[in-house]
Image (cartoon, grey):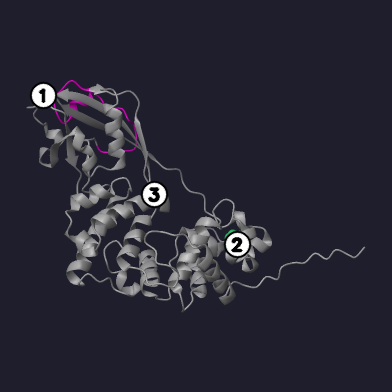
Amino acid sequence: MPDVVQKQLPLRPAGPDTVAALLEWYDREHRELPWRAKPGRRSDPYKVWLSEIMLQQTTVKAVIPYFLRFIERWPTVEALAAAPRDDVLAAWAGLGYYARARKLHECAQVVASERGGKFPKRSADLIELPGIGPYTAAAIASIAFKEPVTPVDGNVERVTARLFAVRTPLPKAKAELRRLAATLTPEKRPGDFAQALMDLGATVCTPKSPSCLVCPVQPDCAASAKGIEASLPAKTAKAERPVRFGHAFLALREDGHVLLRRRPETGLLGGMLEIPSTPWAEGSSHLVGPQRVAPVRGDWWRVPGDVVHTFTHFRLEIAVHRAIVPVDAELTFWAEPDRCQWVHRRDLDRVALPSVMRKVIQHALKEG
Ligand code: SF4
């Protein structure tokens, strides 16, 4: 019997061969996405910008219907710039992070009015625009204008940490991972390379169970060779999210109108509409005599069960109160009447309400 020879795959450090293998794979396996051009083709900067802003902190699946609606309604950056801000916020509702929608609109206005509707081509100039950070600037510059830069987000950090077996935990490893990703960035097809890394991170080199057996860069992957891929990138333990409490007051007029209030322009959910609520604070949820701070005098009833919503930095628990009030109901000092408006309940779908407030309304109205 001949000896069985165990052949070890040669491990070469990630470099130009890795890039070539990844681009070949991308040509075959790339995801078809509505904002993408075919491999090697020039992408529309407006579509790239819009999709990248939408994709921040949100999944591709969630973004696609929003992207298609935006493009149908506002096919150019000039059209988006000319839209009323409330329409843009309302169309964005559900994607979360409303500050991004406000910046998106502001950016469209700057590009339309100060740059003749053309996005700058270099990442160093793109980053000067509202709402565009280093990642988005690099993504637009590489994908739409072929600048040799690589956008590094969580996906690319993960792939890079594994390719080079970086054991330093995040966030400390960020600078090192950016530097290593930059060493791979090719002069030719940098946009396809960036998108190939995105696709690899989304479909093959996934967070929990990377599919190394079908991975096009497996021969160059240091983590896979060492069998430590599932433990990378290492992460510093996160502190638990604090909990904040609040009380929301849904006043339903006898003619079917609901009282809404516009939130201050700056801060969380800035400029969006809300059901008038107490400030959200840590501590106790107990409120003595909620009627005292209700926006309208009335027979307030606390709806059983609270609404829970998770923001990036805290968890919110809201107690919901409801009252049916007459058509000539007067607003109290607590309502801040200058910022209030009555909207018929059948029109609530069309106004810029954040998801948390849609949950509050649904909860308040579920029993009648
Ligand atoms: Fe990720 Fe495995 Fe590919 Fe390495 S070989 S890049 S760990 S999927």
**Gap between marks 2 and 3 measured at Cα:** 26 Å
Badge 3 density bin: few <14, some 14–19, many ≥20, Cα 10 Å: few
In this view, 324 is above or below 60: above
Q: Which quarter of the rendered picture does the N terminus lie within? A: bottom right
Q: Secondary structure at mark 1?
A: loop
**Gap between marks 1 and 2 measured at Cα:** 65 Å
* Rendered residue at 9%/27% (across/down): 327
- Residue that mark 1 sits on: 326
- Residue that mark 2 sits on: 215
The residue type indicated by label 1 comes to Pro
Q: Secondary structure at mark 3?
A: helix
The residue type indicated by label 3 comes to Ala
**From the viewer's perspective, is the residue at label 1 or at label 2 nearer?**
2
- Start and end of the magenta stretch? 279-300
In this view, 352 is above or below 283: below
- The reply to whether the C-beta atoms of the residues labelled 1 and 2 are less than 8 Å apart is no
Tell me which secondary structure the magenta stretch mostly adopts: loop
Badge 2 density bin: few <14, some 14–19, many ≥20, Cα 10 Å: some
Badge 1 density bin: few <14, some 14–19, many ≥20, Cα 10 Å: few
Label 2 beta carbon less than 8 Å to ligand 1: yes
Hey, which residue is sitting farthest left in the picture?
328
Horizontal side, residue 133 vs residue 205: left or right: left
Label 1 beta carbon less than 8 Å to ligand 1: no
Residue 354 position, x and y percent, is 28, 43
* Rendered residue at 29%/55% (across/down): 100
- Residue that mark 3 sits on: 62
**Gap between marks 1 and 3 measured at Cα:** 40 Å
The residue type indicated by label 2 comes to Cys
**From the viewer's perspective, is the residue at label 1 or at label 3 nearer?**
3
